[in-house]
Image (spheres, grey):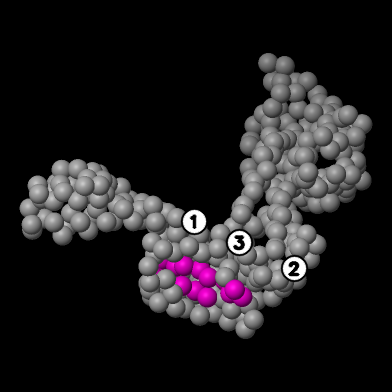
């Protein structure tokens, strides 16, 4: 943030998941590491000027923040976090949706609940489509020449209003990009209710202030901005598992360990399905976190979905994985670790050839 000497470095170890995800967030003050948080946030994150407080602003939620009542109706859970505060890397305080907005005034957009500053792109598009009064695209002719000779007096107010609306588009977009900022010892969040939420770091309190009182002229709004830098990363294919250090695939290693064999072509011929939800491998090639689902089917004509998970087999596989060492060539450059996911399909090592299978 302009005016700060704080730098936040954040790396996602699982770029295909939601937020928060497996990753790391580091906070530096004057190039000295203050602390780390073992999570990566897709939301906007900010710090106090001394870096002590890190704030995650959840200004948008998907519709799943709704829950069913006993009547089958849906309602919003206003106790969901809107602003999370960490102190020196540890969870410190949480402000909920009902703390930051007027819950009687809701804003739903395309299946999402959003309380941050809102840009009405659809309204701008309508305003720019065309003006029946000045026969020009809104925001161009009147603003460029101020020639009103062809406009009927009774149409002027409407024409000017829409032209002004079109002119305000660039300002609105600029505001939306900088609608959350740190100034002095406070965090400011502009909302879509024409309000400004102020979080005072010294008192750790929330104030809701009319936006007009804080920013009387939005066109002159110029808050401190974030200097962001995104490194180009070549991520591995989403469904890909690293090889073992001996050059074998995980499927080959498991087949040998379990006295099974790899499915010849695809899952149709397999009797064991193993899905690696999480396989977190560090730069030393060791597994830090593993979570698998395994299903054994005794009827190859039925899909795996009709059979229950084999919990004992899952434990055996996870224990075996933790003992292995993996190649690290697929971990992205400058990453400390990476989460892989994929399926492995196995078959019984021996089977009796019947007339049916021969056919």
Could you tell me what secondary structure mostly forms the magenta stretch?
A: strand
Q: Is residue 204 visible?
A: yes
Give how far across and how far down residue 188 sits, in percent: 53, 70
Q: Residue furthest top?
A: 359
N-term mark: 2 or 3 = 3
Q: Is residue 274 visible?
A: no
Looking at this view, is 78 or 256 the one in front? 78
Relative horizontal placement of residue 154, taking residue 335 as reference (left or right): left
**Residue 205 to residue 264: above or below:** below
Q: Label 2, on which residue? A: 89
**Residue 350 to residue 205: above or below:** above
Give how far across and how far down residue 25 sits, in percent: 72, 58
Q: Residue at x 75, y 71 (%)?
A: 88
Q: State how far apart marks 2 and 3 are (Cα).
A: 22 Å
Q: Label 3, on which residue? A: 2
**Residue 123 to residue 252: above or below:** below
N-term mark: 1 or 2 = 2
Estimate how packed mark 1 is, as few (under 14), some (14 to 19) or many (20 or more) residues with alpha carbons within 10 Å: few
Q: Indicate the secondary structure of the residue bearing disc 2.
A: loop
Q: Residue at x 35, y 53 (%)?
A: 169
Report the number of numbered marks.
3
Q: State how far apart marks 1 and 2 are (Cα).
A: 26 Å
Q: Residue at x 50, y 80 (%)?
A: 207
**Image quadrant containing the N terminus:** bottom right
**Image quadrant containing the C terminus:** top right
Residue mark closest to the camera, 2 vs 3: 3
Q: Which residues are magenta?
A: 184-198
Q: Quadrant of residue 80?
A: bottom right
Looking at this view, is 240 or 155 the one in front? 155
Q: Quadrant of residue 240?
A: top right
Return the mark for residue 177: 1
């Amino acid at each position: 943030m302009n005016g700060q000497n704080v730098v936040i470095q954040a790396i996602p170890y699982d770029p295909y998941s939601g937020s928060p995800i497996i990753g790391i967030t580091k906070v530096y003050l004057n190039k000295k590491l203050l602390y780390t948080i073992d999570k990566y946030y897709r939301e906007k994150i900010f710090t106090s000027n001394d870096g002590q407080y890190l704030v995650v602003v959840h200004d948008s939620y998907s519709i799943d923040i709704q829950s069913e009542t006993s009547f089958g109706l849906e309602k919003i859970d206003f106790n969901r976090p809107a602003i999370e505060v960490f102190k020196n890397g540890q969870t410190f305080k949480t402000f909920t949706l009902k703390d930051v907005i007027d819950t009687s005034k809701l804003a739903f957009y395309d299946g999402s609940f959003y309380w941050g500053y809102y840009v009405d792109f659809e309204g701008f598009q309508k305003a720019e489509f065309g003006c029946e009064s000045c026969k020009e695209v809104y925001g161009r002719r009147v603003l460029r020449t101020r020639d009103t000779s062809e406009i009927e007096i009774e149409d002027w107010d409407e024409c000017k209003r829409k032209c002004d609306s079109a002119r305000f588009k660039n300002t609105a977009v600029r505001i939306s990009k900088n609608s959350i900022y740190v100034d002095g010892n406070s965090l400011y969040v502009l909302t879509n209710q024409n309000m400004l939420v102020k979080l005072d770091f010294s008192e750790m309190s929330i104030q809701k202030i009319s936006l007009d009182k804080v920013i009387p002229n939005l066109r002159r709004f110029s808050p401190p901005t974030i200097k962001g830098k995104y490194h180009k990363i070549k991520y591995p294919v989403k469904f890909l598992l690293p090889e073992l250090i001996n050059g074998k695939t995980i499927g080959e290693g498991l087949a040998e360990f379990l006295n099974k064999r790899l499915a010849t072509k695809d899952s149709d011929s397999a009797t064991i399905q193993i899905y690696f939800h999480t396989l977190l491998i560090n730069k030393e090639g060791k597994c830090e976190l593993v979570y698998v689902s395994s299903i054994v089917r005794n009827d190859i004509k039925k899909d795996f979905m009709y059979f229950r998970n084999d919990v004992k087999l899952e434990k055996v596989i996870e224990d075996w994985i933790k003992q292995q060492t993996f190649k690290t060539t697929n971990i992205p450059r400058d990453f400390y670790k990476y989460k892989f996911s994929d399926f492995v399909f196995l078959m019984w090592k021996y089977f009796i050839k019947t007339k049916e299978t021969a056919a």
